[in-house]
Image (tube, rainbow, N blue to C red):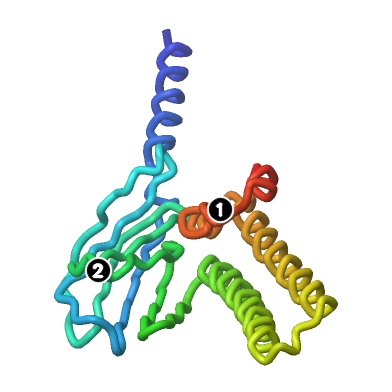
Amino acid sequence: MKKLILTFMALLAIGLMGCDNSSQLADYTVTCTLHGHQQHDSATLLVLEDTYNQLRRCGTTRIQDGTCTFKGQTDRAKVGIIRWDNDSTKPFYFVLEGGHTSITIEAGSWTITGSKGNSNYLHYINQRKAIMDARVGTWQEYLKMAADKSLKREDERRLVALDSLLNDSLQRITVDCINRGDAVGRIVSERYGNLLDDEHLKLLK
């Protein structure tokens, strides 16, 4: 009987330990500042959960003097989404994880600091921008040469090949990022996965 009681108490202790996830929770603070942006009165923080990609509302806060702050707890890095009271403004995606994250949004640009996940996300965004800028430069060179009638067959082949190479690079960094399987990969999948062509879609895990 004594052995049975001890066994029951041991199982109960294991069960209680399994239910106590408080040690795994980390506090987070997200501060978002808007500059030269549309006027907003409030913002809502959402989290994209792993289960069935469900969106969970974490709270709504007022925007005062262009700044809003969210505080809470998370057990791991997740996809965070800030939505504005004005639906015409696109939601802002970022990695929500423990610690302080500072977001600054300006007209046509944004910066984010304070976490490793967001540093990785920003690295992808900068790579993507550099490739897109190079593609725009290639198109502009093509159009300029076509307009002044200096475009030759070898120039056309060179520029088309360069654009194809740049596009392949863009697709590959997107596939590599999505295949990471972490919060950064989920954000990239949500925002840019639909831009992958059939050839690169096959490379997704």
Tag nearer the camera, 2 or 1: 2
Residue assigned mark 2: 88
**Mark earlier in primary sequence (2, 1):** 2
Return the residue nearer the eye: 2 or 51: 51
Query: What percent of the width, then of the height, locates residue 92?
Result: 37, 68
How far apart are the alpha carbons under marks 2 and 1?
29 Å
Which residue is drawn at the image coordinates 67% and 92% (left, top)? Answer: 148
Return the residue nearer the eye: 70 or 4: 70
Eyeballing the image, is 46 above or below 145?
above
Residue assigned mark 1: 182
Q: Amino acid at mark 1?
A: Asp
Residue 157 placement, left or right of 33: right
Residue 12 placement, left or right of 199: left
Eyeballing the image, is 26 above or below 135?
above
Mark 1: few/some/many CA within 10 Å (<14, 14-19, 20+): some
Which residue is drawn at the image coordinates 65% and 75% (left, top)? Answer: 131
Return the residue nearer the eye: 100 or 26: 100
Query: What percent of the width, then of the height, locates residue 28?
Result: 37, 66
Judged from the image, the secondary structure of the residue bearing numbered disc 2 is loop
Q: Amino acid at mark 2?
A: Ser
Question: Which quadrant of the view contains residue 26?
Answer: bottom left
Which residue is drawn at the image coordinates 19% and 81% (left, top)? Answer: 39
Mark 2: few/some/many CA within 10 Å (<14, 14-19, 20+): few
